[in-house]
Amino acid sequence: MNLVVMKFGGTSVEDPAAIARTAAIVAGRVADGKNPVVVVSAMAKVTDQLLRAAAAAAQGDRTGALAISSRLRSRHRDTACALVKDAAAIAALVQVIDDKFDALDEVLRGVSAILELTPRISDLIVSHGERLSSRILTAAFRERGVNTEHVDAREIIVTDSEFQKAAPLDDIIEKRAPEKLLPLIAQGKVPVMGGFIASNEAGLTTTLGRGGSDYTGALVGGALNAATIEVWTDVDGIMTADPRVCPDALRVRVISFEEAAELAYFGAKVLHPATILPAVKKNIPVLVLNSRNPGCEGTRIISVAPHCKSPFKSIAVKKKLSIIDIVASRMLMTHGYLSKMFAVFDKHRCPVDMVSTSEVSVSLTVDSNSSLPEIAADLSQMADVKYEGRKALVCMVGEDIRGQNGIAAQVFNAIRHVNVRMISQGASEINMSFMIEEDDADEAVRSLHAAFFKEPDPAIFDLEARKQLSAVTDR
């Protein structure tokens, strides 16, 4: 059984034209003798609009919340009608859409009545995006000759009860995925399910957090021991930098799991940071592909990538960070002090990206969020604390960075015109990171890209796009 899990992001299912392209891609996999399992995100921007509707209801704006729901209902109905022409099929699909929006409206009315939005209810509201898109795609694929079967992801992806960012229960998923999906595949059917959504052991709807559809795809792929996991998005793969910042950015042909995970965590938008983990455990290759350009080979993520002659594979940027400086001249080296300090971040469920210490101080970086004043208040009980926002973390990923003599000098010479606040090198063999002002981030990336991707290794990077850009520029 040549099983492939295909995850399609929001831009790959954003409208009838995108869904038709996606159907053609899946049909192509079937024609090639593969057995797809399809995981889909909500249509582009739907999750954001559902969150806005929930927030409006919580503020007592029932009219505003229901207006957002009404617009979403029309969008989903219009999309369904544009894709499905069989009278019986479209009548059944529209009825499903109306039933789900009727239920959503009841929830929004309830939230507006009690003026409270709990994490549990928030998950229930935002789950409608994937629940609807997966239904529409199932019908659209079927009309285009793909023998599909809708599967409710909540029957397979089981999590703890940490609503809004639930953790999967791997043992249960490993059991349920084969039980539910393999019989359908054996019958020649293509299962279609929503990503991002799950349930706890009591059957209550949970979510895996923003970007969790990638995670769903990897969890299913791991549980089924798939041959490959494909992540379909709207870019040609992992790039050497954000093309919006560096127009001459190159597609990375192949990269290691470890390198891809670093890039995902430190700001690369193509993959969710957790996506790689289930694939790493089972050593399943992950392909990052473009649904708008399905002929492109994309980026292949494997356990051990071939040697790269270039020092770096890619540059990622994580913005909207803050630096917290903690100064305790008499306490820093006291036994248990660092434990107490990090317990504060644990209490507020605030992850730390980078840490730097001196004899009397600790500096660390965190996502800028509304909890910073509370975190600072708790830390001030043991030290002097100050924090600054609008910072960006630049992460450069490549193989054996730590073993390359003079690489740090080359990096910081390339950005000598930029003020660097914190540096991290040595904690990882494949990652060099530093903190700068957010306003300097784009300029720093352009300077670094110009310095380190002058002569890229053609075995690792796709040089065709650069050649085409040069040809256009020379005209």
Image: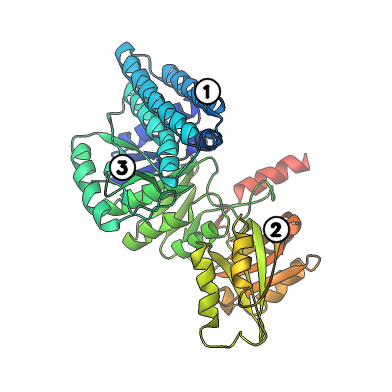
Residue 19: horizontal and vertical position, in percent?
45, 29
> Coloring scheme of the render?
rainbow
Between discs 2 and 1, the one toward the N terminus: 1
Measure how far apart labels 2 and 1 are at the Cα level: 40 Å
Residues packed near mark 2 inside 10 Å, few (<14), some (14 to 19) or many (20 plus) = many
Residue highlighted by disc 3: 154
The reply to whether residue 365 is in sight is no
Residue 458: horizontal and vertical position, in percent?
57, 57
Up/down of 6 relative to 98, above or below: below
| Disc 1, SS | helix
Where on the picture, by quarter, is residue 4?
top left
Residue highlighted by disc 2: 445
- For the residue pair 453 and 341, the one nearer the viewer reads as 341
Residue 263: horizontal and vertical position, in percent?
54, 59
Q: Is residue 171 left or right of residue 69?
A: left
Measure how far apart labels 2 and 3 are at the Cα level: 41 Å
Residues packed near mark 1 inside 10 Å, few (<14), some (14 to 19) or many (20 plus) = few
The tag on residue 353 is none
Tell me what residue is drawn at x 56 percent, y 66 percent. 352
Marks 2 and 3 close (CB-CB < 8 Å): no
Residue 58: horizontal and vertical position, in percent?
52, 37
Three-letter code, disc 2: Val
Between discs 1 and 3, the one toward the N terminus: 1
The reply to whether residue 260 is in sight is yes
